[in-house]
Amino acid sequence: MSKRILIIVSNADSIGPNNRRTGTFLPEVAHPYAEFDKAGFKIDFASLSGDTPYLDALNLADDPDNLTFLTGDGWEEMQKATKLSDVDTSVYDALFIPGGLAPMVDMPENPLLKKVIAEAYDRGAVISAVCHGPVSFLNVKLSDGTYLLNGKNITSFTTEEEDQYARADVPFDLQTALTGQGAIFHPATAWSAHSIQDGKIVTGQNPASAKGVGEKVVSILSK
């Protein structure tokens, strides 16, 4: 029986005082999607509101995996993402949250998202995210009352990278927030491919790391 993975995407389309346009960053969903698809996983999409999600970085559409996502089943399925509250998340072997700036808008505090991630982790499912996607792990408390992040080896978009990209637009610094809840943060050279695994938690630093996150999730679920 094939493994099932739920990709949870933001519904935000703008961020910050200047209403910078945003969405899910194309390679951060397309590259892991390609790995999941090659592995034969059943892939579904959910979004927080159930409205049509947005994509950012369409200028990168000439990348083979990005183009396949846009012209194949990926983007078509993402546009039809089910509202998270209508999804039976207990049937999934893994959750994946792609980045882009959008998750910084609607994922830091969303109570249902926190509940879904906590329950997935508590039952032994893989939870994974890339770039700004690990903001979804903030404020997640496990059944014993501790923060999910406490003592976990994590990476995400770094303070250094944010200073070079969207400092004026984001509401807070992600690296600082993750470490503030006890994460053991592992930064690599800015913009380099860097993904890490801690048990069944997989995180990646930036767009270049998305493929590695997908590969690690596949590796865990294939054992």
Image (cartoon, rainbow, N blue to C red):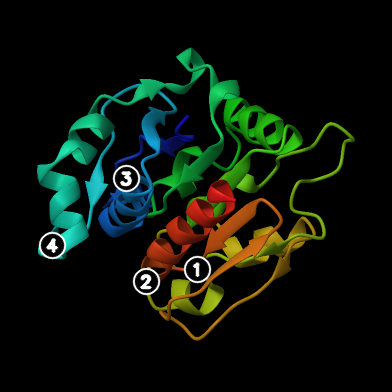
At which x and y percent is residue 177?
66, 59
Q: What kind of element bears circle 3?
A: helix
* Dot 4 alpha-carbon crowd within 10 angstroms: few under 14, some 14 to 19, many 20 or more: few
Residue occupied by mark 2: 208
| Label 1: which secondary element | loop
> What distance separates the C-alpha of mark 2 from that of mark 4?
15 Å
Residue underneath mark 3: 37
Q: Position of residue 104 (x, y in %)?
A: 48, 49
- Residue 214 x %, y %: 44, 56
Report crowding for label 1: few under 14, some 14 to 19, many 20 or more residues within 10 A (C-alpha).
Answer: many
Task: Report the amino acid beneath label 3.
Answer: Asp
Q: Amino acid at mark 2?
A: Ala
- Dot 3 or dot 1, earlier in sequence: 3
Q: Is any atom of residue 131 visible in this view? A: no
For disc 1, the marked residue is 205
Q: Earlier in the sequence, mark 2 or mark 4?
A: 4
Q: Nearer the viewer, mark 4 or mark 3?
A: 3
Q: For mark 4, what is the residue?
A: 59
In the picture, residue 155 is in which quadrant?
bottom right
Taking the spot 41% from the left edge, 79% from the top edge, the residue there is: 191
Question: Which mark sits nearer the N-terminus, 4 or 3?
Answer: 3
Q: Report crowding for label 2: few under 14, some 14 to 19, many 20 or more residues within 10 A (C-alpha).
A: some
Q: Nearer the viewer, mark 2 or mark 4?
A: 2
